Image (tube, rainbow, N blue to C red):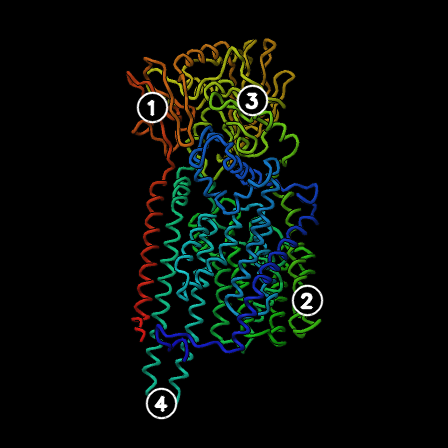
Amino acid sequence: MSNATRTRGSAPPSLTPAAAARAARLTAEGPRSLLLAALLTVVAVCGGDAAARVFPFGPRHRAVNDLANQFVPFHAHLWDLLRGRADGGLLLDWQAGWGTSFLPDYGTYVSSPFAPLVALFPRGDIEYAVYGITVLKTAVAAAAMTYLLRRLGPGTWWWASALGASYALCGWSLAEGTYNPMWLDGLIAFPLLCLVGEWVREGRRPLLGPLVVAVCWVANFYTAYMATIGAALVLLVRLLTARAGTADAAGDAAAGPASGAGAGPARDSATGARLAVVRTLLRAGLTTGIGVALAAPVLLPVFLGSRHAHPGLVREFDPAPATDVLARLLPVTYSFSTPAAFVSTAVLLLVAALLFRREIPGRERWLWAGLCAAVLASMQWGPTHLLWHAFATPNGSPYRQTFVLSGVLVLTAWTGFAHGRPGRRALLGGAAVVAALSLGSLPSSFLTPWAILLTAAGLAAVAAALLLPRRGRYGVLAALLVVGTVVGQAAATTAYADRERLVRLDDYPPWGAGQQRRADALAEADGWPAYRTDPGLPRVAGNDPLLLGGQGAAYYSSHTPAVLTGTLTALGGGWTSRGRNLLSLDNPVTDALFGVGARWRDGTVVRAEPSAPPLPLVTVRPPGPAPAYGRSPFRNQELLLGARVYEAPGAGGACRVGTEVFLWAPDATGPARLGGYETRLLGGRPKRLAALTSLGVQQREGTAPRVPPGGRAEIACLDHDRLRAAVAGLRARAATRIDVRDDGLTATLPPGVTGTAVVAAPRIAGWRCEGGKAGAYGGLLAVDVRPGTTTVSCRFRPPGLRAGQAAGAAGVLLLTASLWLGARGRRRAEGPVPLSR
């Protein structure tokens, strides 16, 4: 009795002795296959890094772009949270950006199940921790793909390991995922979500399926979204190929002696197969929907955090030339703006050979080959490019979905193993296709001599391995040839990418003795919440308060609030990355306004003068309208302070002797001088904005500063006596006690004050004060203080958290209901239990 005609509830046929022996062998070989895939991955990644002499195997560092600016600092902050040393909690971060929402950053950067492993390392070894997690994620991706391959069909166990490792060692993983470790959760998610598709197809694991979806989406929603699209396409192909087999079986039955009588059952069988496909797709949609709903408490705050963020670069998609796309299929190539589609020559040869294997049903061959072509084509077409990237062209690499293509290629390569190894004719045809693709890439500037050499050597080695006998020493030799190709090509690609990244991308100083000394000094000076300790300049990375400690304006995230960027810009702050990477602002007025009592400057911690202690976090301004900022940051600072403290320079642009000279030239690049003092500006919108900077105290009458050319420049002279008087006036109306919590604060006010209580924190979305809507005062959090008010209490809840919790609860109810209905249906299908005699 075939599976297509077996009645529901009937027992499956007993396994034959040969089938039982094979099942036992697959079970025994399973752990060995997974461990080998993971081991090959670790050897290739670490071997390539060692060959390039890159951290932790040599003097070259890995601190480039977002790895240094975001991922290492956010993992360091997670370490502090897990160890109870952070200022703030999961909802609110008091350290970066003068106080920002942390849950969106958590869901974007450190919500991976692997991220908490950083707590097992010393704080000073945070870069080792991030590297170890990166390698571990890549190894787990190899094991997950290997498990999926062996689950999909028969094949030699070490071949599954080699192809699983090939997936984890794809060009996307080695060139992009390695310095964007949060994306590597998507590399793991793709095979796991394909496995969920198999469970759905078979009607199994109704509880585990949605939970796996939820974990994948929480770990990294961005790449999980792409992996879900890829898994849906794979499931569709699996259903269509299975339906083809069912239809063929029905056709054979109808073509028997009583073909006329069998035509009706054949039509019924085909109709039933179509309905089964629809039901499976509906179950898959329900499983995915429940899983995403379970992840909603993290996903919705992330989504709304992006909506409130300062807008990044808006780009139009420009497809890569075909020759460059072909070149990136080969090892030892690198580019930031083309798809890193390399996935070992073994995979390319098997995929190409599948086209020539006549023993495999045509529908199966062409559906899998068509899926590979469709995914590749969709990466080059504007509308589908937007679909892959959630309808927004990314600010950076435009081919972040490439790992899905690598996964589809590996699954296609494994498909042929269900029908045995390819023969000579198929191998010859496949080798010709790979050679033609390589020749097509010759005009590309990304092609290297090593790419051609390693492709040719790998092609010969894998073809020889497929032609060798399976048993004895020949089998061992075949395994060595394939494994050597996979590991050798991946290690060489890793080493090449390591070298190229340091040349082409921004790099930053790695963690060392100097950074540790700075962190120790900041920790010793820390007095939060009585005052802030700013990690100062020069910066180490984009999130120095998270990496080094303290509480400052510096902050870099995909969720940098627009109100924070606008307020900092109005007060003379600087930034890079088009306004999302905010820099520390070293200025006495803003230090007073934001309660900075100590900061790192010129290689040491500089504390506030005893005669001018920092303001508390909450001050009360007299009744009146909120300040309306203009073009001058000096005037804006005075508006927020409530006093005039700057003087205009005199004739010739010179300040009065004894005042401190400040320059604001946001678009200038080059040295600025006053007497013997020199500082360097780095500005130029839209990418960068130079902060206003001190040129020192005016020592001689008539000495004017020299300003670099470039855009508008403004000079102002700060009178410190006036500043001290203004701060003293604010201190008399400041809170007498402040209790800071992980989700807000409570301040006790002096008796009798009225006006507006201003919290030295940006008025980001999510604040509520005393049961009402929080106000704003010059971009800062504010509350009206009426007569008789003695305390101000504000609480922060990230936008979307409540809706996410409701969606999560709905997901739990749906999951419970689906499990109950499924169990009820199975009981009905099994029928009543017969009474024993």
Count of numbered tags: 4
The residue to which callout 3 is attached is: 525
**Label 1 to label 4: alpha-carbon separation:** 87 Å
**Label 2 to label 3: alpha-carbon separation:** 62 Å
- Type of the residue with mark 2: Ala
Q: Quadrant of residue 43?
A: bottom right
- Please, what secondary structure does the residue beneath circle 2 have? helix
Q: Are marks 2 and 1 in contact (CB under 8 Å)?
A: no
Q: Do the residues labelled 1 and 4 touch (CB within 8 Å)?
A: no
Q: Position of residue 232 (x, y in %)?
A: 43, 60
Q: Do the residues labelled 3 and 1 touch (CB within 8 Å)?
A: no
Q: Which of marks 2 and 3 is nearer the N terminus?
A: 2
The image shows residue 335, relative to residue 418, as above or below, that is above
Q: Position of residue 690 (x, y in %)?
A: 54, 28
Q: Earlier in the sequence, mark 2 or mark 4?
A: 4
Instruction: Classify residue 62 as left or right of residue 93.
Output: right
- Type of the residue with mark 3: Ala
The residue to which callout 2 is attached is: 461
The residue to which callout 1 is attached is: 783
Instruction: Classify residue 540 as left or right of residue 50.
Output: left
Q: Which of marks 2 and 1 is nearer the N terminus?
A: 2
Q: Residue at position x 35%, y 71% from top?
A: 274
Q: Residue at position x 31%, y 63% from top?
A: 824
The image shows residue 511, relative to residue 778, as above or below, that is below
Q: Which mark is residue 258?
A: 4
- Quadrant containing the C terminus in the rendered view: bottom left
- Please, what secondary structure does the residue beneath circle 4 have? loop
Q: Where is residue 290 in the image (x, y as percent from the top left)?
A: 37, 54
